[in-house]
Amino acid sequence: MKKKIGKKQKIVFPILFLCILGLIAVCFWQNSQKQTAEQPASAENQTSTAKQSVGSGSAETAQKLDIPIDFQKLQQENPDIYAWIRIPDTTVDYPILQSETDNDYYLFHTPEGKSGYPGSIYTENYNSKDFLDFNTVIYGHKMRNHTMFADLEYYEDIDYLKQHNMITIYTPDHIRTYQVFAAVTYDNRHIMYSFDFVNKEQRQAYLDSLKAVRNMATCWDDSVNVTTEDKIITLSTCNGNDKQRFLVEAVLIDEK
């Protein structure tokens, strides 16, 4: 009887040993597969994923940006239209144009291309169209029927200035908000000729020249801080004196 049991054990034990080895091998393989699946993606894959995420977010932001101007339609009518200026509670609500070749063209041409007054609200090609220059000078006539830039004359009153101190400029992909900080009866020098705004000292010289003006038609809101690192716009119109220009100055405070 003992001999029979001994023979059976000799057969069973090797089989059990092989089974145990097999189970260990299976467990080891499953564990290695799990670790591989949990490992982070390669640097190339991570970069690709990040770019997809950023791109998707940018597209969503653009879709959510509420720009109330149909630039596609406007530019089909006139490709020189590149922005729109709006000042609440005034008549200033117009497209901004720029001719690539003739800086005087929109002085006496409407956005529809008609010759004569009231012309257009426009910039010269000394300024870029992205409003990234230190100073973007925007021109417009002062019309007797209070269209174009005629309402700027109200900024000679400091109370009016503080109550109507927000200017919005729309472009096809941005909304920029500016705060008015000054209204100045300035001399008739050509601003973009007279100052090299690439130079910080020249930027400060321009700001100082505005503040140096002392007359009854000049207002300055000292609560608004403006530096050479800011982006400003200058709204320029006539005031009935050929040797002077009336300027409304505003600084960028928000950009979407």
Image (tube, rainbow, N blue to C red):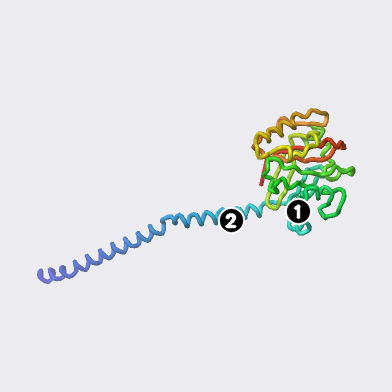
Q: Disc number at residue 119?
A: none
Closer to us: mark 1 or mark 2?
1
Q: Is residue 86 left or right of residue 226?
A: right
**Residue closer to the observer: 195 or 66:** 195
115 vs 204: above or below = below
Instruction: State the separation of the CA atoms marked 1 and 2.
Output: 31 Å
Q: Where on the picture, by quarter, is residue 132? A: top right
Quadrant assignment for the N terminus = bottom left
Residue 80's disc is 1
Give the x, y percent position of residue 159: 80, 32
Tell me what residue is drawn at x 86 percent, y 36 percent. 241
Q: Is residue 146 visible?
A: yes
Q: Position of residue 88 (x, y in %)?
A: 78, 43
The residue at the point 21 percent across, 68 percent down is 15
- Identity, as a three-letter code, of the amino acid under mark 2: Ser
In the rendered image, which residue does mark 2 sit on?
A: 56
| Image coords of residue 223 (percent x, y) | 71, 31
Q: Secondary structure at mark 2?
A: helix
Q: Residues within 10 Å of mark 1 (few under 14, many from 20)?
A: some
- Residue 205 screen position, x and y as percent: 70, 32
Earlier residue among tags 1 and 2: 2
Q: Nearer the viewer, residue 25 or 7?
A: 25
Q: Residue furthest right?
A: 144
The quarter of the picture where residue 236 lies is top right
Label 1: state its secondary structure. loop
